[in-house]
Amino acid sequence: MAARRRAATRPLDAALVRLQTMAARGSQPNRMAREVELIVDEWLGEADADPADVKARLDELHEQLASGVVDAEEQVSYVDPDEAAAVKQAGVTLAALVATRDAVERARDAM
């Protein structure tokens, strides 16, 4: 029996996982923004890169991140203010997501 081939991951999905992993690890906002720049450079550097396709990916990535920021803002409101470590972690994660969303918006506007 032949082994099943795994479906290729869409570049957008791979980027989202990459960014979510970094945010979960507490990456700083400027590092998250730089990662967006690296992702965009990778997309534009693909052999068959079409700027219109890259812009469409950025549009979808921005939409996903904007939704994530709204969710993160809601989660921050549920954090017990007496739990200093939890408040700090929630704030760092929210700041990272906001920086990421804003970096995607800048990249999209530059295209």
Image (cartoon, grey):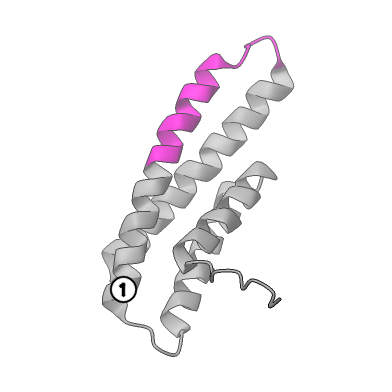
Q: Is residue 74 above or below residue 44?
A: above
Look at 73% across and 23% down and name the residue there: 85
Which of these two is toward me, 1 or 78? 1
Instruction: Indicate the amino acid at tag 1.
Output: Asp
Residue 63 image position (x, y, % from top left): 34, 48
Residue at the spot x=56%, y=48% of the render? Answer: 29
Main SS of the magenta part reads: helix
Q: Residues within 10 Å of mark 1 (few under 14, many from 20)?
A: few
Outermost residue to the bottom = 47
Position in image of residue 37 (x %, y %): 48, 67
Q: Which residue is mark 1?
A: 53
Residue 76 visible, this angle: yes
Q: Looking at the picture, how far across and down is residue 47, in whole percent?
A: 44, 90
Q: Secondary structure at mark 1?
A: helix
Q: Based on the picture, tell me whether residue 79 belongs to the magenta stretch.
A: yes
Q: Position of residue 96 (x, y in %)?
A: 55, 44
Residue in the image at 50% along x and 77% along y: 42
At a point 45% along the width and 31% down the height, the residue shown is: 71
Left or right, 12 with reference to 21: left
The N terminus sits in image quarter: bottom right
Magenta region, residue range: 67-83
In this rendering, would 95 be left or right of 105?
right
Residue closest to the eye, 49 or 28: 49
Q: Quadrant of the C terminus?
A: bottom left
Image quadrant in which you'd find residue 43: bottom left
Examine the rendered structure and indicate whether residue 43 appears above or below residue 108.
below
- Is residue 105 visible in the rendered image? The answer is no
Above or below, 71 against 8 in this view is above
